[in-house]
Each structure stands twice: as C-alpha cells, then as structure tokens.
Image (cartoon, grey):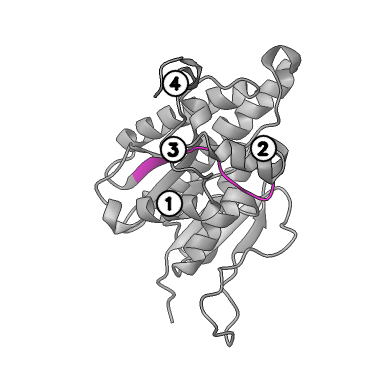
Amino acid sequence: MTDNRQVVVVTGGTRGVGAGIARGFLAAGARVVVCARNPPAEPVRAPRRGARRENPPATAEFRPVDLRDPDSARAFCLGVAADHGRIDVLVNNAGGTPFGLLADTPATRQAKIVQLNLLAPLYTSLAAQEVMSRQEGGGAVIMIGSVSGTRPSPGSGAYGAAKAGLENLARTMAVEWAPHVRVNTVVLGLVRTESAHLHYGDEDGVAAVARTIPLARLAEPADAADACLFLASDAARYISGAALHLHGGGERPAFLDAATVNH
C-alpha cells in the first residue's frame, strides 16, 4: 500500500529548535527525515498525546551528512527522494555560532560560520528543488532565519550577515522557482532550548531576558514548529517569498528605559 503522507526533511533536526520542528511534523502525521553530522543522543519522536500508550510514538529517520559539502547535500536529498518517493518540505534549520567579537575571531572561523549558515542551506535547497520541480504538487522550502540578520549582531557578526543573506536568498528562490516550489523564511527571535543556559544563564537570567520581550517569554521550539507547519500547509498556498517574524513582538527599544520621561 502506498504511503501518501508528506515527506519532510529537517536539517539539524536532532536537537533544539530543529528537533522541535521535527516533532511537530511527526505529530501532524508526516514522514520526517532529520540530518546532522552526528546522530542524536536519543531518537527524535513525536510527543505523546493523552493517556493512550498502546502504540509507540512516530520516530524521525536520521541520516548523517555534512551539508557544507555540495556533493554530500545533493546525495543526501536524492537519497531521501529515492527511498521515500518524494520530498514535500525542506526545513533548512541547521546552523548556529559560538559567541565571538569580529576582531577576536580568525577569518577562517568566520568563513566556516558563513558556510554553515548560508552556503549549506543553499546547497540543500538546490538539491531539494531538483526533486520538487519534477514531482506532482511541487514542494515548499522553509529557511530558519534569525533576528540577528535584521539588526546589529555583536558577538555573532558573521552569523548575522549569513542570516541576512539567507532571507534575501529565499526571496530570490521564491521568484526563480515559482510556481512549483514555494520558499519562505521563519525569522526566529530568542528561543528557549536545552542549551539556553549557555546564552542566558540560570532561570533568573532567562526570566530577565523574557522581560525584554513584549510577549514576556522566550519562544519554545514548538512555536517554531507551528510556524513551519503553517508555511508548509495548504493554508499558506499563496505565501512565497515572505518572512514570518517569530519574535514575540521584538525587542523593547533601549531608549525607552534610558529616557527620563515615564513611558
């Protein structure tokens, strides 16, 4: 019997935001393939719903790959398509950066950051488009961007520049690949993941950071999953080349707290 569920690829889908996105698609009934350079400590599974425990939760398939190599990225996507028959959705989530001021970080390190956050999504998108353009129904590519690409990004300058480029790249892809492939970006603000303590400190630090956000909390990986599910769905069938800002209202302007007038 043919499995008609959507085939979804989530890069960097083994932890953090990527794992949250993968879980969201699993819960929605998709066949999900996650990839990273190293396997996850535990399989990525759909969250359990309710008290019923008879059936094991759906689990994402893991494939190791270094997407910074264009040949490896293409082989990965073509392999998924060969094994599953198609690729309906690609979520380009893999990325990240350590903290480092520009003048204190070697140029070779900056180049690797750009390679991971801009070139790897380019390579993977090109390979996925090769598949999607030939299949009935086309497909959807979703870039995971960052507010670091829309404002100054001290301590992560190359990362911010790469994310700015990624959003521009998505808009160009949306024009060039229409009407068969839709391309959009989810622009993430601050997200609470298992590594949040590395960025914000303990619970008091997380709470202090949350107070700077209009909606008074950090995003959760499930919030990113919901945004991706929407952009991949038929409800977003006329949305392409767009950027969905998932940042809880943005950041309160610093001058409001510095000014002597009561705001």
Label 2: which secondary element: helix
Q: Earlier in the sequence, mark 4 or mark 1?
A: 1
Label 3: which secondary element: loop
Between tags 3 and 1, which lies in front?
A: 3
Tell which residue pokes out farthest to the bottom in this image.
Answer: 54
Label 1: which secondary element: helix
Horizontal side of residue 247 vs 64, given as left or right: left
Q: Earlier in the sequence, mark 3 or mark 1?
A: 3
Between tags 4 and 1, which lies in front?
A: 4
Q: Which residue, given by chain and number where applicable, does mark 2 sit on?
A: 200
Residue 228: mark: 1
Whether tag 4 and tag 1 are in contact, CB under 8 A, the answer is no
For the residues labelled 2 and 3, the Cα–Cα distance comes to 17 Å
- Magenta region, residue range: 182-196
Is residue 113 located in the magenta-colored stretch of the structure? Answer: no
Q: Earlier in the sequence, mark 2 or mark 3?
A: 2
Q: Which residue, given by chain and number where applicable, does mark 4 sit on?
A: 256
Between tags 2 and 4, which lies in front?
A: 4
Residue 214: mark: 3
For the residues labelled 3 and 1, the Cα–Cα distance comes to 22 Å
Amino acid found under the numbered disc labelled 4:
Leu
